[in-house]
Image: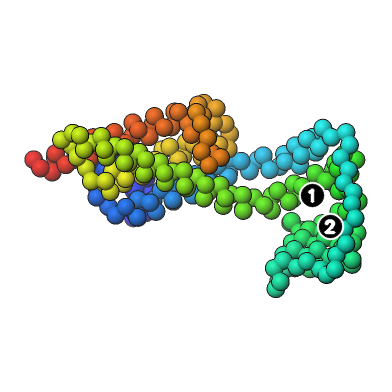
Amino acid sequence: MRVPDFIKEVIWSFYPPRYRQIADKPFLKSLAYMSKILIVAFIIAGILFSPKLFLLKDSIESELSRFEVFSVSGNVTQSSPIVIPRHNPWVVVDLNSNLNLSKEIFVIDKESIKYRFISPKSIPRSQLNNLASNRPAASGFLTALLIMLLPGIALLLYIRMWIKYFLYMLVFGTLLFIIMELSRYRLRWKQMLNISGHALTAVILIEVVSSAVTTVYLLPVLRFLGLNIYTVTTILLAALMVVGIVGYHIEDFRKRR
């Protein structure tokens, strides 16, 4: 059975002599590899985080108990229904009528809020006007809302973390390129970026998977784009890049013999 190229590339990222081959590949392929590793890390982190979803309702209800009084009141008038999107709507708001949930995800009408999670559910709007007095119903609604928003939240986090690791590739690749230019073991900038992208394999897996449990041991030092920069994995990335550069030149030396 043939081993998939992606699996080979993951293994090669931890085998320094292969960095001779990694460094000479097109940069866009290294960028695509980094993106795939990030997806794999997200999937693993999602699996580790999933048990917490079963405790989410109790956690929200517990947090709502901190409010002694939490009431919302006001007069809202509506000239016509709000339909989002216009065709095959997901959300309908019509405070002048009583509606039934059909294909929509959320329907807010005169008396209640109806939503579809696993099965259609309904909660009277009056119960949400006072969260402190209706914690079980409110926590159930907020839990379903958060879970339905998870795909969008995950996509936003993926984009932010992709930008972070892309900048890691550029910064560390450029920095090591400048340093190596001062020595006899020069590499092209593209080669250094490729080495940086593959050296990120362990860093991405450690940081993203740990985020589902705890990242305290990674020693966060500052925040960028709302994400932590960690001391341990930053040092690890620098060390792995040096190992990759050494591996490149060892393999290059072997080929010249």
Q: CA distance from mark 1 to mark 2?
A: 9 Å
The residue tagged 2 is 113
State the colouring used for the structure image.
Answer: rainbow
Q: Is mark 1 in CB contact (under 8 Å) with mark 2?
A: yes
Q: Residue furthest left?
A: 257
The answer to whether one can see residue 11 in this image is no
Q: Position of residue 3 (x, y in %)?
A: 35, 52
Dot 2: what SS? Answer: strand
Corner quadrant of residue 131: top right
- The relative height of residue 94 versus residue 22 in the rendered view (above or below) is below
Q: Around disc 2, counting alpha carbons within 10 Å, would you say few (fewer than 14), some (14 to 19), or many (20 or more)? A: many
Q: Label 1 sits on what residue type?
A: Phe
Question: Label for residue 141?
Answer: 1
Of residue 169 and residue 146, the one placed in the foreground of this image is 169
Q: Position of residue 193 (x, y in %)?
A: 32, 45
**Residue at position x 35%, y 50% in the image:** 30
**Residue at position x 69%, y 53% in the image:** 148
Q: Quadrant of the C terminus?
A: top left
- The relative height of residue 197 versus residue 115 in the rendered view (above or below) is above
Dot 1: what SS? Answer: helix
